[in-house]
Image (spheres, coloured by chain):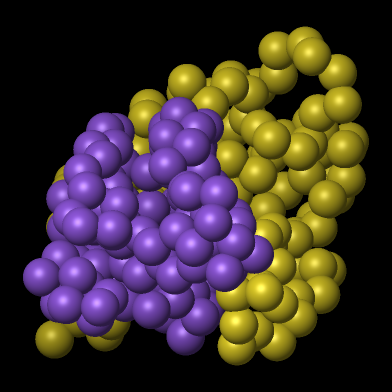
Amino acid sequence: MEAIETRHGGTVVIEARGRLDSNTARSFEEKLLGAIAPADPVMVVDCSQLDYVSSAGLRVLLMAAKRVKAAKGRLALCGLKPHVQEVFDVSGFSSIFVIHPNRAAALAAFP
Amino acid sequence: MLDETKLALRNDDADLPRLNDWVEQFGRRRGLAHDRLFEIKTCLYEAVANVIAYAYLDHHPHQIEVRLAIADGAVIATVEDDGQPFDPLAVTLRPPEQTIELAQIGGRGILMMRQFMDRMRYERRDGHNLLTLIRCLPEPS
């Protein structure tokens, strides 16, 4: 599991790679929560290289989304592979997260 | 005919990749469809990860036994542990939330199991939790 952070204008993009599960959730949590700006954070989590997400991974994404909301910011996800999308669907995450097909679409949606 | 295989795991997250590899091998050997295998692998992972995280109040090593079988046109997966009693079927899950603010952080693993599996059974027997997950296979054509 890797998390690669880049900046595109005022948007922080975290690209999650590999498996986000019980074994990797803690280090990803540190990285993701650490990347949230204290005020008005604007973030994209690019999941195009994410092969698997377990409930431990979902937990981290939801915690980050709650923090971003509390800081009056915005967070979107993009590029979910079919199995990751399926896990999002059955766990109810598809309806609460903003999800774009790819990074370009996610960045374009943040003016 | 019962065609069962079993795996013993330690109550340690480091053992979870072994579980995945073992389920993967079972699926390949039995020629399970990719999607069906994914569902079973995901649910067993969630079930065992739950046991590792919550079943033990001590810090001692414990053994978790996982069994997989194909019988009566279904994949039957069983997780047996000697942790404190916990029935995932008895957990009341709230209806799905519509906002990030209201969304509950926990309970997603149990939700996945209920959604992906056709049936689940729980039994407390001789100081052990026995959780059975059942996923029906399509009729052979």
Q: Is residue B65 visible?
A: yes
Q: Identify whether B50 is placed above or below A47.
A: above
Which quadrant holds the N terminus of chain B?
A: bottom left
Q: Position of residue B33 (x, y in %)?
A: 19, 66
Q: Please name whichever residue, B57 or A19, is drawn nearer the observer in this view of the structure.
A: A19
Counting the numbered discs, the total is: 0
Residue beneath the point at 59% across and 32% down: B65
Q: Please name whichever residue, B82 or B99, is drawn nearer the observer in this view of the structure.
A: B99
* Apparent side of residue B34 relative to residue B103 in the rendered image (left or right): left
Q: Identify whether B123 is placed above or below A29.
A: below
The chain letter of the purple chain reads A
Q: Position of residue A79 (x, y in %)?
A: 19, 67
* Apparent side of residue B95 relative to residue A58 in the rendered image (left or right): right
* Apparent side of residue B64 relative to residue B135 in the rendered image (left or right): right
Q: Please name whichever residue, A24 or A106, is drawn nearer the observer in this view of the structure.
A: A106
Q: Identify whether B100 is placed above or below B139.
A: above
Which quadrant holds the C terminus of chain B?
A: bottom left
Residue beneath the point at 24% across and 68% down: A78
Residue beneath the point at 26% across and 52% down: A13
Quadrant hosting residue B40? bottom left
Which residue of the protein is positioned furthest toward the top in this rendering?
A: B60
Q: Is residue A55 visible?
A: no
* Apparent side of residue A17 relative to residue B92 in the rendered image (left or right): left
Q: Please name whichever residue, B5 or B65, is drawn nearer the observer in this view of the structure.
A: B65
Residue beneath the point at 30% across and 52% down: A12
Q: Colour of chain B?
A: yellow
Q: Position of residue B37 (x, y in %)?
A: 29, 59
Q: Position of residue B18 (x, y in %)?
A: 37, 27
